[in-house]
Amino acid sequence: MTQKKRSFNKLTSIPLQHVVIDDLFWSNRQEINRKVAIHHQYEQLEKANHINNFRIAAKLKKGRHKGAFYYDSDVYKWLEGACYILHHKKDEELKTKVDEIVNLILKSQLKDGYINTFYSTNFIEKRFSNITFMHELYCAGHLIEAAIAHYNATGSRSLLDCVERLIDLIFAIFMEEKKINPPGHQEIELALLSLYQITNKRKYFLLAEDFINRRGKDANSKRYIFNQFLNLNSTLRHVKELLLKEGESSEIEDFYANLSIKERIKFYYAILNGTCYQLDTPVRKIKDPVGHAVRAMYMFSAMTDLYAENGDEHLLNVLVRSWSKIIEGKMYITGGIGSIKGIEGFEKDFKLRINRAYSETCAAVGYLMWNWRMLQITAQAKYSDLIEKILYNSLLVGQSLDGKKYSYTNPLISTGDYERKEWFLCPCCPPNLARTIASLGKYIYSQSENGLYIHQYIGSRLKCEISDVPIEIYQQSQFPWQGEVKITLLLEKNFDFSIFLRIPEWSKGSEILINGDKVAINPSTSNYLEVQRNWNDKDVIAIAFEMQSQLIYGDPRVKDIKNKIAISNGPLIYCLEQNDNNEFDIFVTSINENSHLRIKHKEDFLDGINIIEGKMSSGKRFVAIPYYAWNNRGPDKMQIWHKKA
Ligand SMILES: [Zn+2]
């Protein structure tokens, strides 16, 4: 089974198996993911009944599903992450856990292919009755992604076969019985397009296309959504009653309880008019991204994959326009997106509150996934620049340095009462991070017809073939602390091809040497520098990107950051944490535009970081740390945006 090339992609992704991370910075994050986070998450999934739900569905235990109706998806994301880890590491302890989970999933499958522990242990007759709010298709999507990762890691078809039976059932119900309404939480669409890529079965493509095309087309959608909303509430009440009758309790997050009256009104309004779940507009007519940010990112990812398959220009136009709208008025300096708490999503342009920044960790994961796909269809560095920003800031901040705590939302300022948690009643973010960190190798390189693209400067070994000639690349990188990168080619024979190097948007000057000779740097409009030559074995590309501390001025259209300054260095956004600045209250920090900023590496501080030292207008010295590293010493005051002196 080979991966089918997508016709309208300019670039081709390189399978994870072919890239091994060997990096100053990320190897440590991956080891923490493998040794700590993935096992810690498994324990939490066990404690919170996620895994037990499968034991019950598999009839190995008595009882009924406990927890939220989407809990299966967290197990699937965990499994996907664990399988990515197994791509490269023999890890018996992890493999045993993976085998156990796969077995439970297989045993939970009903004869006709159905899997969903919420419905199969409660009331199977109600399945597929609430596509808007209940997450059966969302869970199925995550199961597809897990099954593909499992197949790639182990070569076993067991989970993939099980998934194909499930999708055949979904196809029969949704394509043949003509149910017109689309899934309320996008995810299955992008997963189906991946399944199509590896199986080449057209029906998976057709189902994904149909789910995407259905959105926003139902003239009676408001009434339909209202009825589905009533159904959601009665279903949840019904489950609670069933559990209580049996002397059980089920801890389910009361999402609404945490919302203020204003937030509730906004939330209900966005739910019932369809904007929260992007059900208000057909996808080809979207003018402005609205609603739940994670759903939007998964939807745009699927639309990009669909474009890559069918070349539909209407889709491309919407994708390019939506991407620009987010960059211009809906994205935080960290690359975080989604600013309204109630809908966990987009506000109007420039309404980016920093104290209540939602910026969900899952939205960062989804944004990364979408940007990766945009990069493949366009080969433009603005997408890989943004991937870098997301990776080092809005995504990485989601996990504590020790790999045991997570943030769901990521504020840009804290009065000292915010702390990462071990787990959440809605634990979507931790396994989403685990699968992303474990699959980091996917995001570093791509191939084009005539060459190799290097998108991220992350130490790694790559093996691939260009025009059927095997090549190996060994990349050593000092990122994110210094701008030096060394790329060594390992070739069996001389070979003429191009290497495309991303020139990062933050670098004001770069020097590139090939085997000691300087190369003129004139990147194309895409911001990739193409170096075409007859490459020899052991050729070395030595790059020095200028990585300087910079002041970033707040966009005057955004009220909270007008007349404010933030600090960056290379791909990293910096913040002040009170802990490092005992002589003054960080909230009064005012920074002079001419303030001299000094960078210092501290190997034994916060797992090894560069701090930035500078002087405030009062003359007092301040210390800034990378934003991702804050909140690792207990709750503390923190801010990214400072007054301009
Ligand atoms: Zn999440």
Image (cartoon, rainbow, N blue to C red):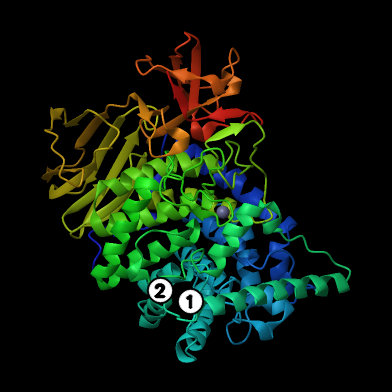
Above or below 616: residue 473: below
Q: Is mark 2 on a helix, strand or loop?
A: helix
Instruction: State which quarter of the image contains the C terminus.
Output: top left
Percent of width and height locating residue 527:
21, 43
Up the image or down, 442 lies above or below 49; here it is above
Q: What element carries label 1?
A: loop
Residue at image coords 67%, 49%: 423
Residue at horizontal 69 percent and vertical 63 percent from the top: 50
Vertical comparison of 204 with 495: above or below: below
Task: Kindly identify which residue carries mark 1.
Answer: 182
Residue closer to the observer: 131 or 51: 131
Q: Is residue 218 visible?
A: yes
Nearer the observer, 186 or 91: 186
Q: x and y percent of residue 218 in the render?
A: 45, 80
Q: Residues within 10 Å of mark 1 (few under 14, many from 20)?
A: many
**Pointers 2 and 1 in contact (C-beta within 8 Å):** yes
Earlier residue among tags 2 and 1: 1
Q: Quadrant of residue 130?
A: bottom right
Q: Quadrant of residue 107?
A: bottom right
> In front: 399, or 272?
272
Residue 214, compared with residue 261, is above or below; it is below
Residue at image point 60% right, 46% down: 37
Q: In which quarter of the image is ligand 1?
A: bottom right
Query: Please, which residue is most extreme toward the top here?
Result: 619
Q: Which amino acid does label 2 sit on?
A: Ile
**Residue at which label 2 appears:** 212
